[in-house]
Amino acid sequence: MNDFSTVIIGGGISGLTCAKYLNEKGCSFILLEGSDALGGRVKTDKVDGFILDRGFQVLLTNYPEARKTLNYSDLRLKYFDSGSLIKAENGFMKMENPFRKKMAYFTMAFSSVGSLSDKLKIRKFANDLAEIPDEEFFQMEATDTLTFLKNYGWSDKMIANFFKPFFGGVFLENDLVTSSNFFQFTFKQFFRGDTAIPAEGIQAIPDQIAEKISGVKIRLNARVRGIENNQIFLEGGEILTANKIVLATNPHTTDNLLGETTKRVYNTTTCTYFSAESSPLRGQKFIALNPNRRGVVHNLCVPSDISPTYSTSGKSLISVSTQGLEKVDEHRLTSRIKRELFDWFGAQVNVWQHLKTYHIPESLVQYRAGMPNQALKLNDNLYRCGDYLAYPSLNAAMQTGRKVAEMITEM
C-alpha cells in the first residue's frame, strides 16, 4: 500500500495551490517543503521594525486565479493609486489610470509623457483588451513587446517615458523582449483591477493558502534527494510511496529530480531597502519610474505609504529596484543609489539608512514570443507545476497548481 495518494514536492505558490484544491476534494496527500518556511519566492522578513518583502512584489487583484484562490478581505489589502510617477528633468510627470479615476483623462491630456495621440491610443487599447477573455491571450500570435508597441503606433517618446520603465519593471528586463501576448494580458490586469500589497507583507498570500490545508498534511525541512517510479527518497534515508507525485519546486530542482538539463534565460532583479524620517514621495501612493535605464534606480516606491503597517517605527520604508545586475556589491550599490536619488530628492537622501539588499539572480524565467507552455503531466504517475512552465507571474503559478490538482482528481 502506498503511503499517500499524492505527494507534492515544494511549498511555493504552485505547490500550495495544488494542495488547496486537492484538499477541497478530500484527497489524501502530503506536501514536502525542503526549507523551514512555505512560500518559495513569495516571502517576507521583519527587520528593525520594518516589513521587507524579498524583492518588490505586488498583487494584481484582477488576476483570475488569485480571485479564485484568495480571500482578499482577509489579506487586508492596501492599494496603490492606479498609475505611476515618471521621473522628469524637474520633478515627476504623473500618468494616472483613466479607468480608475474620473479626472485622469484631464490630467493625462496635459501630461508630457507622450502626445495626445499616444494617450488616446491608451484608452482604445485598454477598451479592446477588456473584450478579450483572459485565457485567449496566450493563444494569440505574438512578437516581442517593443515591436508590438511600435507597430501599434505609440511614439518613441511614449515608449521611452512610460512603457519601457513601467513594463520593464514588471518583466524585469529593460529591452521589452518579453512576448507581446503576455504584455497584453498584463496590461489588462493593471487597467481593470487594482495593484495591492497585503497589510502584513506579501508572505500573507502563501500563509493564507496554507491555512486552508491541515497542518498534518505539510512537512517542513523535508528535503527530497531523488524520485524513482512511485518512490520519493528523502535526505536522512526515509522513503515515501505515492500514487501521484507532483514536482512544484524551482526549475533547477525539478530538472535535477527528473535527470534533465534545460537551458533557461532568467531576468534578474535587486531590491534595496532604506529607512527615512519622511516619505520622499510625500504620501503619494504611486510607483516612481525612471526612464533612464542606464542608472541603478529603475523604480522606487514607499511601501509604508501604501500600508503603514510596513513600518512600526514611525519612519518611512523605501524600496528601490535595480534590474540586470549579475553580481552585487551592497556597499557600492547603496552608495550609487543614494547618489542618483540625491538628484531626485536632494540632501534628505544623505541620512537615509540602508536596511537590507535582496539580490535575486533568477527572479523570473524570460518569456519570449513563441515559447510554448510546457507539459504539466509527464506520465500517469508524475506531474509538475510552476509559473516557469507557462508565463512568469503569480497568476500562472496558481493556474498550473490548480490544473495539476484537476488532472489528478478527474482521473
Image (spheres, rainbow, N blue to C red):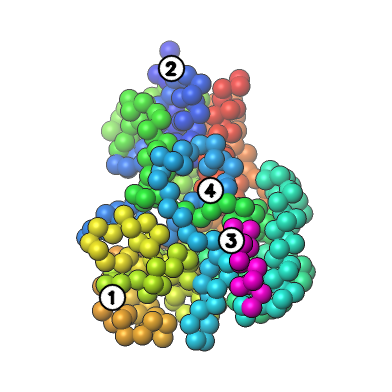
**Mark 3 or 2, closer to the camera:** 3
Going from the N terminus, do you reach mark 3 or mark 2 first? 2
Question: Quick one: label 2 or label 1, which is nearer the N terminus?
Answer: 2
In-front residue for pair 389/67: 67
Residue behind mark 4:
61
User: Could you say whether the residue bearing mark 4 is in a helix, strand or loop?
Assistant: loop
Viewed as shown, does residue 37 lie left or right of 15?
left
Q: Residue 408's spot in the image, x, y percent?
A: 56, 25
Residue tagged 2 = 2
Which residue is disc 1 drawn over? Answer: 352
From the image, tell me which residue sits under label 3. Answer: 101
Return the x and y of residue 330 as percentages of the image width and height.
Answer: 32, 72
Question: Percent x, y for residue 219?
Answer: 33, 32
Residue 359 horizontal/vertical position (percent): 38, 63
Front of the two marks 2 and 4: 4
Give the residue at x 61% y 62%.
Answer: 102
What span is in magenta?
98-110
Q: Earlier in the sequence, mark 4 or mark 3?
A: 4
Please give the count of numbered marks on the rendered protein.
Answer: 4
Identify residue type, mark 3.
Lys
The answer to whether residue 104 shows anywhere in this view is yes
